[in-house]
Amino acid sequence: MHVLNIHGANDVRLDPVKVPKPGRNDVVVRVLACGICGSDLSYIKLGGIHRKPGGVTPIGHEAAGEVVRVGAAVKDVHPGQRVVINPMMTPSYIGSGGPEGAFTEELLVREARLGDSLLPIPDDLTYEVAALTEPLAVALHGVNRAGVAARDKVVVFGCGPIGLGMVLWLVDRGVTDVVALDLSAERLVRAQALGARAVINPSQEDVRARLRELHGWAQVFGRDAVGTDAFIDAAGAPNILSDVVRMAKYRSRMVVTAAYLKPVELDLGAMLTTEMTITTAVGYPTEMAEVIAALPRLREKAGSLISHRFSFDRVLEAFAVAGTFASAKVMVEFAQEAPA
Ligand SMILES: [Zn+2]
């Protein structure tokens, strides 16, 4: 069998690896679907995470699969059980700098606990939809941090899988006025299909003028502002923060979920009179269980986030596609049989 390893900046390889044996407290999961995450792409650009010289970073953390081997001391888990892995609740941080990554046929889950690092998949949910639990939990946490109410006017910057997931959750919470922004026409079509009221392509339209049309306008100490209540940044473009500060109304809110690789400028002078709140959201401290419980109801909308599917032997091609603007969630799928 194989595992996908980062060896250096822009150097990712499918390396042969031994079939894992679980210790007393561990479980081995046969991975059947694993999504490609924006963070995987960042790790590849950076040359890995916590990687020792000459070492590798195995990646992949959005996995769903079937339990195949169970350590003697693990309770309530049995072979054949269908599970999603919560990588944040694994001691080795699967796919984020630890010794395991989920782009592999059989994945070792150390100190596995049902309802914690392993979440049962509802019976009739497909593995590929179940594998969306993790990115949808990231999206839900971002929405939770924005503290939105149904009547709020909300802007989502970026319609990659996380931004699209945010549109999905906002609409699901009854927010009727969601405006989504992206540079990709394909992604904007997906956002609209998920229920965004309007979409804006910032390369073709004046964002501030369009938001003024859509959300109305307000005054902040004699300055014009847009009527948007909450901005969520799932894009990470260097101008977003300063653009928002300069058009934000009094006591509006902004949540940053994008991974900025460089510092950005912030006009605190313009921000002062807004009394706005800027905060961040990372991961999903509490959201995984809620997402998987909601997935049977939302399966079609969730499934619409998947733009491409590749078999595991074509995982490097899958990564090339995930790096393009036209893609949303790229899903890697695995054969059911035991690996050689
Ligand atoms: Zn992810």
Image (tube, grey):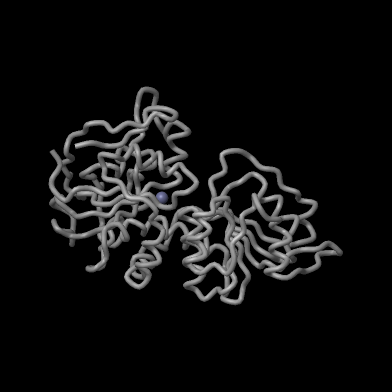
Is residue 26 something that shows in the picture?
A: no
- Which residue ends up furthest to the right in the rendered image? 222
| Image location (x, y in percent) of residue 95 | 35, 43
Q: Is residue 30 left or right of residue 42?
A: left
Nearer to us in this view, 213 or 104: 213
| Image location (x, y in percent) of residue 26 | 21, 48
Corner quadrant of residue 4: top left
Q: Quadrant of the C terminus?
A: top left
Corner quadrant of residue 84: bottom left
| Image location (x, y in percent) of residue 184 | 54, 51
| Image location (x, y in percent) of residue 242 | 71, 50
- Which residue ends up furthest to the top in the rendered image? 54
The residue depicted at 15 percent of the width and 51 percent of the height is 68
Instruction: Reply above or below: 100 against 270.
Output: above
Is residue 333 something that shows in the picture?
A: yes
Instruction: Reply above or below: 172 against 7.
Output: below
Instruction: Reply above or below: 17 against 104.
Output: above
Count how many numbered circles sit on residues in the image: 0
Q: Is residue 321 left or right of residue 249?
A: left
The residue depicted at 21 percent of the width and 43 percent of the height is 105
Q: Is residue 206 left or right of residue 138?
A: right
Q: Quadrant of the N terminus?
A: top left
Nearer to us in this view, 323 or 134: 323
Nearer to us in this view, 48 or 44: 44
The residue depicted at 74 percent of the width and 62 percent of the height is 275
Nearer to us in this view, 311 or 112: 311
